[in-house]
Structure formats: C-alpha cells, structure tokens
Amino acid sequence: MSLVKTWYTPEAAADKFGLAPEKVLAWVDAGLVRCEREKDRVAQVNIDDVRLEVEAMVRSQE
C-alpha cells in the first residue's frame, strides 16, 4: 500500500507543476493521464502520469 498521495484534482495537479488545468485535461483526453470521473467531469488525475508527461514535455524542449 502506497503512503504517498497519487490522486489529485486536475487543478491541484496543474498547480503542483505550474501548468494550466486545461493542459492536464488535454492529456486526460489524449489517454496519457489516468483519471477518476464523477458523472461527466474529471474528478481526479494520477499524479505519476502527470509527472511523466511533464518530464516528456521538458525533454522535448531541450
């Protein structure tokens, strides 16, 4: 069992990495970031997936 928080709201995940929430939601729509939904909205995203996408974004800018 993990003792680290792995699920964040899209807004909190975006804030953690200095991104716009729309960027995180775009990754969800592209199937790059796992999410938990409540009805039709994304309630939480997996922070490990977000971290991987941020790392890929940074590598592509080098």
Image (cartoon, rainbow, N blue to C red):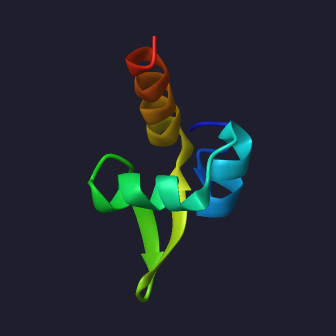
What residue is shown at x 46% (from left), y 10% (from top)? 62
What residue is shown at x 39% (from left), y 58% (from top)? 26
On screen, residue 23 versus residue 13, left or right, reads left
- Eyeballing the image, is 22 above or below 18? below
On screen, residue 50 versus residue 5, left or right, reads left
Residue extending furthest toward the bottom: 39
- Eyeballing the image, is 52 above or below 10? above
Residue 50: x percent and y percent?
Answer: 49, 41
What residue is shown at x 70% (from left), y 41% (from top)? 18
- Eyeballing the image, is 41 above or below 50? below
Quadrant hosting residue 12: bottom right
Residue 47: x percent and y percent?
Answer: 55, 43
- Eyeballing the image, is 59 above or below 52? above
Residue 21: x percent and y percent?
Answer: 59, 59
Residue 1: x percent and y percent?
Answer: 56, 38
**Which residue is at the front of the view, 52 or 46?**
52
